[in-house]
Amino acid sequence: MVTIQINGKLVQAEKGEMLIAVIRRQRIDIPALCHHDAVEPCGSCRLCMVEITKKDWDGWSKFVTSCLYPVEPDLIVSTHSPRVVELRKTILDLYLARSPKSEIIQRMAAEYGITQTSYQEVPDGDNCIMCYACTRVCEELGCNAISAVQRGHKKIIAPPLGEPPVDCVGCLSCANICPTHFIEWNDDNGKRTIWGKQFELVSCKICGKKTITRDFAEYLVRKRNIPANYFEICDDCKRTELTKSMGKIVIAAQEISK
Amino acid sequence: MKYRFVIDPVLCTGCRTCELACAFSHAKNLKQGRSRIYPLSHAQDKYVPITCLQCDDAACVKSCFFNALRRNEITGAIELDLNRCVKCMACVAACPFGCALFDDIHNEVVKCDLCKGDPACAHFCPTKALKYTKL
């Protein structure tokens, strides 16, 4: 256990834990877009910046991204000092210039008192903020279907060569983790389209309800050793089937006890 | 494991008090959660309360790529860490008993976590068909 000081309060933390986890456990709200517990932290959105110092640093302090900074003994953290707030305001101002239509960025900026960006808005600026949450989650799944392509201001997240990705299984993890809801997909008529690739959805054998994509089911069978027949029927029908088989056992047990 | 969640289907009358207790105890933002327990009928006036069986070799745990589903060693329940969940629906599709559910209202995956060792359904069951007892 390590003792650190957050906004003047002494707090216990596990060794090796990242600062953001400790700060959020204290119910202190610091904004972050790229952070998600499911994936490795990468510190690309810069919004979770905090100011840290120590007693023996002679009054010096530095700014670190709390999602990437492991706790150290005797650390003094301030999450809302005037300099951090100023820093965060600048970042949000820049985000607002880049993605003026994003609701989450508008909301976050409004919390810091920014409703209109002081920079020039990017013409046709999309909602992608290059946080790499989607590529990191795809990597975690073991698919690596998407990555950043091109360089500089032309950089976008896309499948290789701009073609429908071969390795994508259509699980929607990337679309769900995207903080600004930029990744588009749609389910229509038993087909799912994402990244320009079309997937067939598994239909329940009994009621016809659509569950996950066939590619994802096959991926789970292959990678995680789950029997293929688990994916044949939907969760509602599985419960009904379980009730029927349990019912048979109950009736048989009652007859034996008579 | 000290305690076990015991279901006695013979005693179940299908009154659905457990469903209400579950939905209310998992309420969020002043809205009821989706119930994790369902007393389903298999014959006339015969019910079996269906809920997560907390399997030893659980398909939901195996299917999760993000370690969001982990067993709580104290209660024995498999708990879902919503901060780690990315809603890929792998556990919902993989559970052979259909007990990992998707809550449309709160837009999140839910499963029985035995209320962190104090199941509300067992408290409210009028016929004691649901029990949380020492084995």
Image (spheres, coloured by chain):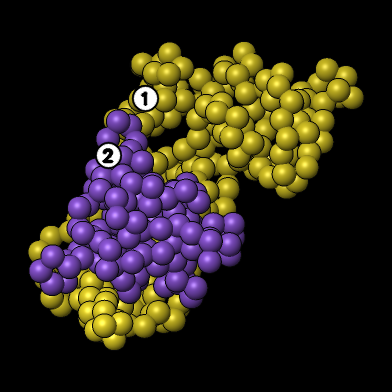
Chain colours: A yellow, B purple
Q: Up-down: is B92 above or below A65? A: below
Q: Residue at x 78, y 33 (%)?
A: A3
Mark nearer the viewer, 2 or 1: 2
Quadrant (top left, top right, bottom left, bottom right) of the N terminus of chain A: top right
Residue A253 vs A128, above or below: the answer is: below
Please provide percent x and percent y for residue B71.
53, 61
Give the labeled residue for mark 1. Answer: A107
Q: Secondary structure at mark 1?
A: helix
Task: Report the side of B29 relative to B69 (left or right).
Answer: left
Subunit under mark 2: B
**Residue A84 location, quadrant:** top right
- Tell me residue A90's x, y (percent): 52, 21
Residue B50 image offset from top left, x and y in percent: 29, 64
The correct choice, above or below, for A243 with respect to B16 in the image is below
The kind of residue on which mark 1 rests is Arg
Above or below — where is A30 with respect to A136? above
**Residue in view at x 71 percent, y 39 percent:** A13
- Identify the residue position indicated by label 2 in the image: B32
Residue A157 placement (x, y as % from top left): 40, 53
User: Which residue shows up at 76% across the image and 31% down it?
Assistant: A4
Dot 2: few (<14), some (14–19), or many (≥20) neighbours within 10 Å? some
